[in-house]
Amino acid sequence: MAAPTKPPHLSADEKNDALRKAQEMRSKRAELRGRLKKGSVTLQDVLDSCADEVVAKMRVAYLIQSLPQVGKVTSKKIMDEIGINENRRVQGLGKRQINALLERLG
């Protein structure tokens, strides 16, 4: 078994930059989830833009739960039926899974 590696030592400026970037990404994801909930953007639009880092790193469960009329229980049921792990991120979805999501929710 390989020995665990230590994370790189970051200066205070590098840490602050990383924290700022993380907060910016969380804010963008929250804004996207709000737009999905209001219906101003569709699931198809979001999945088409999966090259965008904001979308790519979002968990599929959070994405589905952001849709109107879909909560945690419904989201889990849909993901189980399609065969998507609860920890899967959008960038890790295969074409079959994307098509199944769009067929079910699109």
Image (cartoon, rainbow, N blue to C red):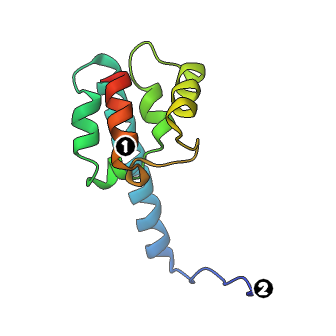
Which quarter of the image is occupied by the C terminus? top left
Which residue, given by chain and number where applicable, does mark 1 sit on?
96
Residue 18 location (% of width, % of height): 44, 65
Residue 40 location (% of width, % of height): 22, 22
Residue projecting furthest to the top: 69
Which residue, given by chain and number where applicable, does mark 2 sit on?
1
Q: Residue at x 41, y 58 (%)?
A: 20
Q: Is residue 91 left or right of residue 84?
A: left
Q: Residue at x 61, y 79 (%)?
A: 7
Q: Is residue 59 left or right of residue 85?
A: left
For the residues labelled 2 and 1, the Cα–Cα distance comes to: 35 Å
* Amino acid, disc 2: Met
* Amino acid, disc 1: Arg
Q: Secondary structure at mark 1?
A: helix
Q: Secondary structure at mark 2?
A: loop
Q: State which quadrant residue 36 falls in.
A: top left
Residue 23 location (% of width, % of height): 43, 50
